[in-house]
Image (spheres, rainbow, N blue to C red):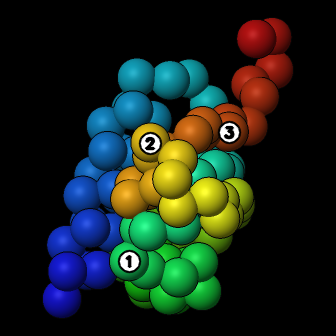
Amino acid sequence: MREQSLIKNLIDKIHELASDEPGRLIGVRLRLGALAQISARHLREHFDREILGTSLEGLKLEIDEFTDIHHREARYIILESLKFEEIDGH
């Protein structure tokens, strides 16, 4: 269940960061290191399952996979960016 805990922590962080921003969160971009011990497919499956029925349901998830096992971030999943729907006048 390591994946479930990892995804819950990621979703908690997304909620935390999004709460400080105006507009509706519509997308998330992640970087997946080559040694992160989860595939992009499994990450997406777990993520989609965890956000089902929440305010994040329907969120667009983009995953950039890196293949360099020697990169200093090869073991990590990095929250690269959040994308928000623009509010009129902002």
Q: Which of marks 3 and 2 is in front?
A: 2
Q: Which of marks 1 and 2 is in front?
A: 2
- Which quadrant does the N terminus fall into? bottom left
**Amino acid found under the numbered disc labelled 3:** Lys
The residue identified by callout 1 is: 37
The residue identified by callout 3 is: 83
**What element does badge 3 sit on?**
strand
Residue beneath the point at 65% across and 65% down: 67
Check the image and name the residue furthest to the right: 88
Q: Quick one: label 3 or label 2, which is nearer the N terminus?
A: 2
Residue 72, disc: 2
Q: Where is residue 13 in the image (x, y as percent from the top left)?
A: 31, 44
Q: Quick one: label 1 or label 2, which is nearer the N terminus?
A: 1
Relative to 24, say whether 42 is above or below.
Answer: below
**Amino acid found under the numbered disc labelled 1:** Gln
> From mark 1 to mark 2, how far is it between C-alphas?
15 Å
Q: Position of residue 7 (x, y in %)?
A: 33, 69
Residue beneath the point at 50% across and 23% down: 21
Question: From the viewer's perspective, is 11 left or right of 49?
Answer: left
> From mark 3 to mark 2, how far is it between C-alphas?
26 Å
Decide which of 74, 11 is in the foreground and name it.
Answer: 74
Q: Quick one: label 3 or label 1, which is nearer the N terminus?
A: 1
Question: From the viewer's perspective, is 12 left or right of 86?
Answer: left
Relative to 51, say whether 90 is above or below.
Answer: above
- Which quadrant does the C terminus fall into? top right
**Amino acid found under the numbered disc labelled 2:** Arg
**Mark 2 Cα shell of 10 Å, populated few (<14), some (14-19), many (≥20):** few
Relative to 51, say whether 75 is above or below.
Answer: above
Q: Does the CB distance between marks 1 and 2 fall below 8 Å?
A: no
Q: Position of residue 24 (x, y in %)?
A: 61, 40
Residue beneath the point at 56% across and 23% down: 22
Q: Quadrant of residue 51?
A: bottom left
